[in-house]
Amino acid sequence: MNKENAAVLERLIQGNELYIKNNQNSVDVSLELRKKTAKEGQHPYAIVITCSDSRVIPDAIFSAGIGDLFVIRVAGNVLDNHQLGSIEYAFSHLETNVIVMLGHTKCGAIDASIHKHAGDDKFIKYILEDISEAIGDETDDYKATVLNVKHGVKVIKNAFHDHPDIEDGELDVLGAVYDIETGVVEWI
């Protein structure tokens, strides 16, 4: 990890510690900042891919404000070409070089995959198939979450390993799990 990306990771870690300590989010969401980012554009320091679960709020978890994080949300934090295109946009056009694949405890999509609850849903089955590929026969919720995160990290690394906009050592892809009860982010 290069020096700039290490500083971003440290900012994420400190942001999570602040979130846990304060039990609130007191970041800049002011009218002035909204006007500034509307005029000057966004310059996020990290890309976060996470679940759509309403209990997982990346901006709060990392004590981030307007323009700080480029967040991509999808149930089970699975990846297809749409999410990969969003990642590509963020590093190619916004120069954001740290990607965090953020899973979380008590994920409904993980649970459904473990217990094979695809049901008659028309589209959910695609999410569950992707997670099932990642977790195999794992039945422990936390271990399955970690496997799913590691799978996502691998997918991202494989997708962009030879991308023309990425120089060696420029892009870092990190895995993490957010505990929805404690608020702690564990880096894996």
Image (cartoon, rainbow, N blue to C red):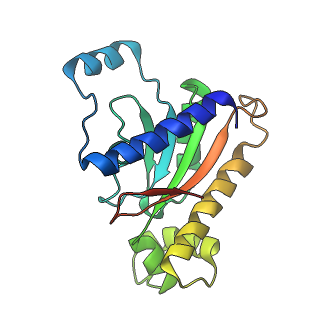
The percent coordinates of residue 32 (x first, y second) are 24, 16
Q: In this view, does 146 lie above or below 152?
A: below
Percent across and percent down for residue 85 are: 57, 41
For the C terminus, which image quadrant?
bottom right
Residue at 34% in and 12% down: 39
175 up-or-down from 26: above or below: below
Instruction: Say if 147 sits above or below 99 in the image.
Output: below
Position above or below: 184 against 44: below
Is residue 122 in sight in this rendering? no
Query: Would residue 22 be seen by someone viewing this image from the given angle?
Result: yes
- Locate residue 73, reporting x and y percent: 42, 51
Residue 63 is situated, as x and y percent measured from the top left of the image, at 35, 40
Which residue occupies the foreground of this view, 142 or 18?
A: 18
Q: In which quarter of the image is residue 5?
A: top right
Screen quadrant of the N terminus: top right
Q: At 32% across and 14% down in the image, what residue appears?
A: 36
Q: Residue furthest front?
A: 21
Q: Which residue is at the far left?
A: 31
Q: How many marks?
A: 0
Residue 22 relative to residue 58: left or right: left
